[in-house]
Image (tube, rainbow, N blue to C red):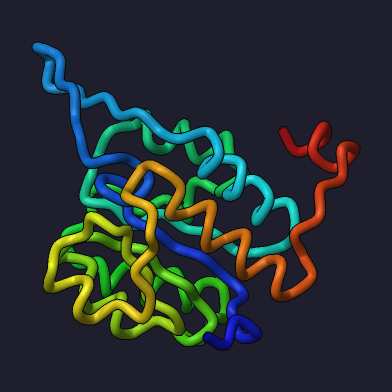
């Protein structure tokens, strides 16, 4: 795979950054668990100059808080997305990116158009079969268990940009 054109990452939440499980309270708020190693990969990407976005059908403000803490600007966190392709195009337009410059991660039917339109479409090992059929890469890791980390790290190492600077980290986070 040619990682040289990748300048940005974008991903779905439920089933990609999480295992897809949701815990709901009586007020209708949903709670998710995230893998810290996936989150660290997002921080490494934002620290090293990549544009990173979230495009999710989820609408919980906790999603915004989680990924703002990883260095993603609020305007790049698309909540309650009902047309992921439209939001992906907006993300690309606002950052002057060609779709081929973005690696996108998704696991279900609403992600398929973006997976096919982006530079490298990725899905976790437990993605739906139709998604696996159109993805450029099926990670050996399931959603919420390292899919993001594996691919972010692979791209960044291929580009010589998987570098950790404690000073930058302390200032950013």
Residue beneath the point at 62% across and 59% down: 153
Nearer the observer, 79 or 106? 106
Q: Residue furthest right?
A: 167
Return the x and y of residue 149 as percentages of the image width and height. Answer: 53, 52
Residue beneath the point at 32% across and 65% down: 123
Query: In this rendering, would 10 be left or right of 128?
Result: right
Residue beneath the point at 71% across and 67% down: 157
How many marks do you count on the picture?
0
Vertical relation: 104 (above or below) 14: below
Task: Tell me where residue 34 sits by quadrant.
Answer: top left
Return the x and y of residue 78 as percentages of the image width and height. Answer: 35, 53
Task: Tell me where residue 173 sits by quadrant.
Answer: top right
Return the x and y of residue 64 as percentages of the image width and height. Answer: 42, 37
Q: Residue furthest top?
A: 26
Nearer the observer, 138 or 160? 138
Vertical relation: 104 (above or below) 97: above
Vertical relation: 11 (above or below) 146: below
Residue beneath the point at 65% across and 85% down: 4
Task: Tell me where residue 33 sits by quadrant.
Answer: top left
Query: In this rendering, would 87 be left or right of 82?
Result: right
Vertical relation: 123 (above or below) 115: above
Return the x and y of residue 88 as percentages of the image width and height. Answer: 36, 71
């Amino acid at each position: 795979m040619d990682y040289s054109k990748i300048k940005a990452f974008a991903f779905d939440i439920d089933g990609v950054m999480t295992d897809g499980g949701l815990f709901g309270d009586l007020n209708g708020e949903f709670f998710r668990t995230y893998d810290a190693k996936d989150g660290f990969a997002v921080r490494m990407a934002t620290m090293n100059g990549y544009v990173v976005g979230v495009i999710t059908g989820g609408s919980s403000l906790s999603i915004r808080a989680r990924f703002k803490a990883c260095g993603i600007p609020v305007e790049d966190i698309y909540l309650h997305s009902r047309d992921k392709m439209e939001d992906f195009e907006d993300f690309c337009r606002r950052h002057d990116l060609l779709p081929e410059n973005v690696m996108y991660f998704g696991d279900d039917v609403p992600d398929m158009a973006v997976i096919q339109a982006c530079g490298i479409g990725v899905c976790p090992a437990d993605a739906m079969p139709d998604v696996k059929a159109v993805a450029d890469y099926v990670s050996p890791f399931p959603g919420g268990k390292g899919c993001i980390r594996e691919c972010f790290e692979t791209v960044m190492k291929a580009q010589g940009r998987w570098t950790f600077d404690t000073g930058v980290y302390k200032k950013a986070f």
